Image (cartoon, rainbow, N blue to C red):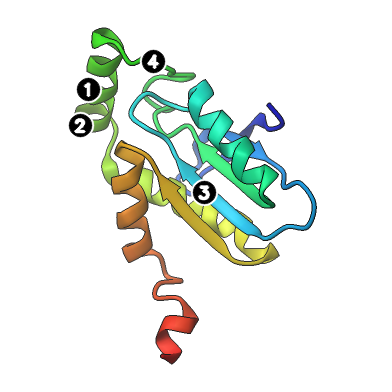
Amino acid sequence: MTGTMESMTMSDGATIAVYHAQPTGDRRGGLVLVQEIFGVTDHIRDLCDEYAADGYEVLAPALFDREHPGFEADYSGDGLARGIELARQLHPFELSLTDVQTCIDSLAPAGPVFVVGYCYGGSVAWFAATASPAWPPRAAMAA
């Protein structure tokens, strides 16, 4: 792995872990990669590193750190059950959106920022795209 887990302060003042992968070569943009309900797992970190190898600076926030610091589950029954509990009962969905926006805002000064998510993160990415103050992109507005 090329990235590192770092601490980042979110807009509500909470500090959560964020996997941060620096781009290889010229920076093509920033990317917020939103986790599955299983947390920022080896799989998510590998994806971040792959995007970084393609030239993206990547942040993957550990969205459930407030409720379960360091949460990483396997794909089994117990891990799935805990991920569902965190995503549906313990962690406010809106907080995921504001954390993603904090990551977007952190990356934006250096150029364009993209958002991608998997599983739970796919829903977060879609809602974040519709809620972000930078939406719609300027190119779409000019069309």
Task: Of the two numbered discs 3 and 4 on the same chain, state the one appearing first in sequence.
Answer: 3
Q: Position of residue 16 (x, y in %)?
A: 52, 32
Q: Relative to 55, is 105 on the left or the right?
A: left
Give the residue number, with chain letter if any, for mark 4.
Answer: 73
Q: Residues within 10 Å of mark 3 (few under 14, many from 20)?
A: many
The quarter of the picture where residue 92 lies is top left
Give the residue number, with chain letter if any, for mark 2.
Answer: 88
Task: Tell me what residue is drawn at x 44 percent, y 18 percent.
Answer: 72
Query: What type is the residue that disc 1 sits on?
Result: Glu
**Closer to us: mark 4 or mark 1?**
4
Give the residue number, with chain letter if any, for mark 1.
Answer: 85
Secondary structure state at the residue bearing disc 3:
strand
The quarter of the picture where residue 129 lies is bottom left
Task: Of the two numbered discs 2 and 3 on the same chain, state the one appearing first in sequence.
Answer: 3
One can see residue 17 in this view? no
Task: Tell me what residue is drawn at x 66 percent, y 49 percent.
Answer: 54
State how far apart marks 3 and 1 are (Cα).
23 Å
Q: Relative to 11, is 132 on the left or the right?
A: left
Query: What type is the residue that disc 2 sits on?
Result: Arg
Closer to us: 72 or 11: 72
Q: Is residue 18 above or below residue 103?
A: above
Q: Residues within 10 Å of mark 2 (few under 14, many from 20)?
A: few
State how far apart marks 4 and 2 are (Cα).
16 Å
Contact? badges 2 and 1 (CB < 8 Å): yes
Closer to us: 68 or 77: 77
Give the residue number, with chain letter if any, for mark 3.
Answer: 32
**Closer to us: mark 3 or mark 1?**
3
Screen quadrant of the N terminus: top right
Q: Position of residue 119 (x, y in %)?
A: 31, 37
